[in-house]
Amino acid sequence: MQPLEGFYYFTQVVEHGGFARAARALGIPRSRLSRHVVALESTLNVRLVNRSTRRFVVTEVGQEVYRHATAMLSEADAALEAVEFARAEPRGTLRVSCPVGLAQSPLAAILPDFLAKYPAIRLQLHVSNRRVDVLSEGFDVTLRVRSQPTGEDGLVMRSFRNVDEFLVASPAYVQRTGDLTDPMELAGRDTLDYAGEFDRRPWELVGEGGKSVRAEHTPRVICHDFVVLRAAVLAGLGIARLPESVVREDFSSGVLARVLPEWRSPQGVVHVVFPSRRGLLPSVRAFIDFLAERLPATL
């Protein structure tokens, strides 16, 4: 791949009909201009122009090189204009991946305001609990919730807020089965777990003084959707571990109650990962800044 500089100076010499005129137009010494063209000829191993004190003639191969060089330089200018255009205002397609639970409630509540604020942005929202490969799948931003976020090769992370998860059940279920006094009693109760078929784990719970336990249980329902789990809990099917944002209003209205209220799950950290801070497009920066401003309050 040859540098564009030599081709640029060569096209200027051809367009101005000689080295002297091109040098005056560009405001550079004629000797410097000549060195660039000679270096290009040496690199290509061809004669591009025949020149003497009185004549300047572009060779046949020089005419062909000139035609391709002008097209190449024009495309290079177009590429620079495209970058400048993209950086001037948040615009274009923004590809975002988000977990189901986060998308259905907190994110859904604020997205209309984001799209109204940036009308030139088109949003492609991928909603899935699958851990996507940000770089290979071409996502600009990915939202995640992890109790212990870890760095990922080639990615930048920005955290927003911690979220609590509580054990909850309907008052009718608690009345029917009785109160729990110890996390180990969960093994004998109906539970509803937010997990996949192969990633079910004991519930890790933290009590007063930072004491932690791993409560084994056999879920009656396993799914990757907080809406389904909440409906099952409301129907009195068992005990579930749900984020505060999902059940806050249910606590207020009394349709759900906390089970083992002195115990909670380790806090999850809501965060985003994105490919790089360097060369960040305005649309990506605008989305991340918007999330930092609005998402914590909705959580």
Image (cartoon, rainbow, N blue to C red):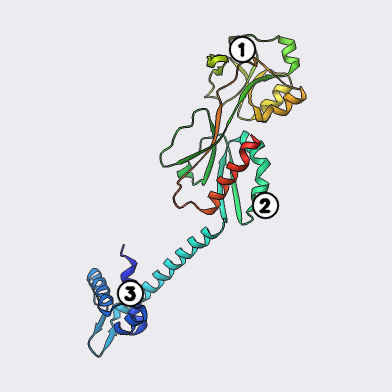
- Viewer-closest of 157 and 96: 157
In the displayed structure, 194 sits above or below 27; it is: above
- Looking at the image, residue 216 sits to the left or right of residue 56; the answer is right
Q: Give the mark nearer the N terminus: 2 vs 1.
A: 2
- Looking at the image, residue 270 sits to the left or right of residue 27; the answer is right
Say the numbered circle drawn on residue 116. 2
- Viewer-closest of 120 and 164: 164
The residue at which mark 3 appears reads as 9
| Residue at figure coordinates x 64%, y 25% from the top left | 242
- Looking at the rendered structure, the secondary structure element under dot 1 is helix
Q: Residues within 10 Å of mark 2 (few under 14, many from 20)?
A: few
Amino acid type, mark 2: Ala
Amino acid type, mark 3: Tyr
Between marks 1 and 3 in the image, the one whose residue lies nearer the viewer: 3
Instruction: State the count of labels.
Output: 3
Q: CA distance from mark 1 to mark 3?
A: 78 Å
Amino acid type, mark 1: Leu
The residue at which mark 1 appears reads as 186
Q: Quadrant of residue 110?
A: top right
The image position of residue 81, as x and y in percent, is 48, 65
| Residue at figure coordinates x 35%, y 72% from the top left | 8
The image position of residue 70, as x and y in percent, is 39, 74
Q: CA distance from mark 2 to mark 1?
A: 46 Å
Q: Give the mark nearer the N terminus: 2 vs 3.
A: 3
In the displayed structure, 185 sits above or below 5; it is: above
Residue reaching furthest to the front: 209
In the displayed structure, 253 sits above or below 290; it is: above
The image position of residue 259, as x and y in percent, is 66, 16
Q: CA distance from mark 2 to mark 3?
A: 47 Å
